[in-house]
Amino acid sequence: MNIQLAQSSLTTVRPIFMPMYDWREVSPVTRSLETALEKAILDRFGSSGMSFEMWPTDGTFEDRWMDNGLVLSQVCSHSFVTYLSGKVSLVLTPHYSAQGCIGPKIGSYVLVNRESKIRDLESLRGGVAAISGQGGRSDHLALIDAILPLVEEGTFFSHIIETGAPLKAMRAVVEGRADVCCLDAVSWAMAKAYRPDVSSKLIAVTPTRALPGLPWVTAGARTAAEVECIRDAAISVLSDPKMEPVLDKLFISGFSILEAQDYSPVAEANADIFKLGMVI
């Protein structure tokens, strides 16, 4: 399939933005993926006069995802089913080769210090959890989801510390500032591949259930024809044998074309947690 779009409302648009697994160690290959996607999309919109305009330097991820100029980005699945619902259009969901990933679904791992005596969830009661940030599906919410059956009177951990990044959450556990952290399967695979200095000091206590993974999306104002062109361009990149070295380093192994309703398990899992409030 090779879809071309001669006429489009898209003229000035934002560069491709793939932030979710953009670790420093894989930043060059992430840029290569973004560049390949931009070229493929421009090829399909070439006669429409599309041009890329740089992102504002002071915006957040959330600002970018809500921008009407968004052409393609990867977003958190929690964000997709909450404040981005109806405001972005689903393009595709990548598959990952990391252990704990099944097709478009991604699980997480509950991690503790290898030198600690903790080897089950019950032993974490009253401990300190390290998370990247509040509301992240793959770390904060996945961790709460895992301990939810053990929660009594709305509490489990003594408190939670926010570190701002998965690697910093892992370091908090390694350094003894926290007892546990939780990483999705892709981040854990990256940590083992690219940061063994940290990951080798941690051990997985248990996996969490796999849920639909982090989708690639475009702005919700896109027409159906525009979304199909963007999807076709993305598929061409993910299917290009020349891209295999890049995709392998990012653990990308395929894709699925899902509908928004396929993400209902994420919303349902979140609802179970929010019934108790943001449990700590």
Image (spheres, helix red, strand yellow):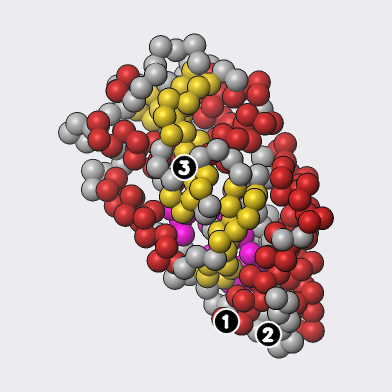
Residue 92 in percent (x, y) is at: 57, 63
Per the image, label 1 sits on a secondary structure element best described as loop
Question: What's the mark number on residue 123?
Answer: none
Residue type at mark 3? Gly
Residue 258 in percent (x, y) is at: 50, 65
Question: What's the mark number on residue 8?
Answer: 2
In the shown orientation, is residue 17 left or right of residue 161? Answer: right
Q: Residues within 10 Å of mark 3 (few under 14, many from 20)?
A: many
- Could you say which is closer to the camera, residue 30 or residue 207? 207
**In magenta segment, residue 2:** no
Which part of the image, by quadrant, shows the N terminus?
A: bottom right
Q: Which residue is the site of mark 3?
A: 107
| Chain part drawn in magenta | 62-81
Residue type at mark 2? Ser
Residue 161 in percent (x, y) is at: 43, 30
Residue type at mark 1? Thr
Q: CA distance from mark 3 to mark 2?
A: 38 Å
Quarter of the image for residue 229 reads bottom right
Query: Going by the picture, which residue comes out furthest to the right?
Result: 242
Which part of the image, by quadrant, shows the C terminus?
A: top left
Residue at horizontal 65%, vertical 49%?
252
Q: Residues within 10 Å of mark 2 (few under 14, many from 20)?
A: some
Residue at horizontal 57%, vertical 67%?
91
Q: CA distance from mark 1 to mark 2?
A: 9 Å
| Disc 1 and disc 2 in contact, CB within 8 angstroms | yes
**In magenta segment, residue 63:** yes
Q: Which residue is the site of mark 1?
A: 223
Q: Residues within 10 Å of mark 1 (few under 14, many from 20)?
A: some
- 150 vs 274: above or below: above
